[in-house]
Amino acid sequence: MEANEQLTTAKQLLDPHLPKKIRIKTLTKSTVISRSTLIILALLSVYAFFSFDYKQLDIGEVVLSTFANLKAMFLEPHLKHFSFTHALYQVFVTLGLAFLTTLFGAVIAVFLGLLAAENLTNKRVSSVVKGSVAFIRAVPTVLWVLIFAVAAGLGSVAAVIGMTFHSVSYLVKAYSESFEELDKGVIEALQASGANWWQIIFQAVIPSSLTYMISWTFLRFEINFAVAIAMGAAAGAGGIGFDMFMASSFYLDIREIGAITYFILAIAILLELVAIRLKKKLKVNG
Amino acid sequence: MTALLEVNHVSKQFGSDMKALSDVNFSVQEGEFVSIIGPSGAGKSTLLRCINRMIGASSGEIIFDNMNVMNLKKKDLKLIRTKIGMIFQHYNLVNRLSVIENTLHGNLGKKSTLAGVLGLYSQEEKEQAVNILHVLGLEEHIYKRADQLSGGQKQRVGIARALIQNPRMLLCDEPIASLDPNSAKIIMDHLRNISRTMGITVLINLHQVDVALKYSDKIIGINHGQVVYNGSPKNITKEDIQRIYGSEAEDLIFDVGGIHAS
Ligand SMILES: Nc1ncnc2c1ncn2[C@@H]1O[C@H](COP(=O)(O)OP(=O)(O)O)[C@@H](O)[C@H]1O
Ligand SMILES: [Mg+2]
């Protein structure tokens, strides 16, 4: 009986009447839609390039002079209007802005994140917090800074408040999602032994999410560093971004822009290296 | 002997039509080892959780240690919960914390909020934790992280966390359902040992009829939220098993004679 069954399956495997071509992707509604979207987008971009109004621009000349500018910027960088120590100091100002806003954001986000986690509060509170945070996140950081600048005036105060605001919304999402990962059985076990909400938060929820929280926070710090540079230029928040703004629109010195860019690049690489080491360490302990 | 736990006419309804428990009655004496058996979905977990009010029963009364669990204030409920330890199928430990930290979690209910939040434990509490871990054969793993342990070891940490409460009763929800036979036997032996030497009452949900018959002083059989057997494991018959498990009984390769013999 069993041997018979095996024989028939073996026969089926050798059956020559299988369809010749075996598809592994079938045409469903969603694949059709996504493919046609891609094709339409590709056609539109090709059309756009032909329909640009190039006026009297000679493409070749434009490309060449852009390359000349880039060459001056990156191959012949110098510092003329600022000293090296000044630039270094300004980089630290920018880092400080990024650090401060990340720190404020993280502290506030831990508490809002607890409220936003469905397993720690209830569905209602959670969706209210998640909803408002999603709204804040949808508006870009720069816009928040400009909005707060109406009240506080353009400058570092508006930058700190605006950047903190957006950091909170970003980190609340990240934190609450990692809080929600916690098995509800663990919470149940501590509740059953009489532990209260705060004890459960600090003895189970946060220890379980700590590594996630640290990597998300560091990622936000890197984002805030980039934003802080832009804020220096756009909102007069000071720091290296402001120097870059001065070099480009006031002194019109592209070589200085090159030097400052190298500075920022060096710091960004440094941050990346720290992040990698941090992650390795967290993986070992986490 | 007086009854430590009395469950009178307890019913539980989820939503408008899902009746998980209907008119459940039984009592448990101090120091008794009582198993609740029944097919999955019978209401075993719900019944266990009604006792420490992790789930509120819809009607009836539950008397534990002369207090009616059903209408306790928040503070008294917390006090009752510190007297009842609970053990779970999936251990429910905090994976990233050490064995001793997980054990000490059993004391959170007795601490102030701040001491609990900061994880401040007295020397006495720590010594007790080490002693309990020693009894359970975990002395070599005290500083290991919980997720580095095997299933059987994790369950022993779960027992340690319940024992440090100095409980009057242990509620165990299928504590051996995820374990291999050897680890399961170790856990069951520990639970029997705890019950006998410390006089702690044990109320345990089990899937395995043979294990229940072997270890228990009393068996409560549940089917569809109703108690269909309540008595000694010695007198249980094939018909009783069939009544508890319904049509599923056919699938249980079951031989009452063989079980009573072993
Ligand atoms: N939170 C809940 N909401 C609705 N129904 C539930 C809930 N918990 C359990 N039930 C239902 O109650 C019945 C008993 O469940 P349970 O006590 O978990 O059974 P057992 O532990 O015996 O397998 C099941 O039919 C289950 O679907
Ligand atoms: Mg169950």
Image: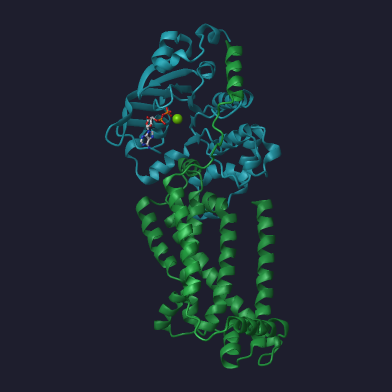
Q: Quadrant of residue A229?
A: bottom right
Ligand 1, seen in the image, is in the quarter at top left
Looking at the image, the residue that sits furthest to the left is B16
Looking at the image, the residue that sits furthest to the right is A75
Q: How many marks?
A: 0
Residue A140 in the image: above or below residue B214: below
Type of colouring: by chain
Locate residue B195 relative to residue B186 in the image: left or right: left
Q: Colour of chain B?
A: cyan
Q: Nearer the viewer, residue B96 or A172?
A: A172
The location of residue B56, given as percent across then percent down, is: 35, 37
The location of residue A178, given as percent across then percent down, is: 52, 53
Does the rendering let one see residue B113?
no
Locate residue B215 relative to residue A153 in the image: left or right: right
Residue A53 in the image: above or below residue B33: below
The location of residue A165, given as percent across then percent down, is: 46, 70
The location of residue B170, given as percent across then percent down, is: 49, 31
Please state, as top left, top right, bottom left or bottom right, where the N terminus of chain A lies in the image.
top right
Locate residue A25 relative to residue B157 in the image: left or right: left
Give the letter of the green chain: A
Residue drawn at the location 59% of the way across and 12% of the way down: A4
Does the rendering let one see residue A180?
yes
Q: Quadrant of residue B185?
A: top right
Q: Nearer the viewer, residue A266 or B105?
A: A266
Q: Nearer the viewer, residue A275 or A265?
A: A265
Residue A66 in the image: above or below residue B65: below
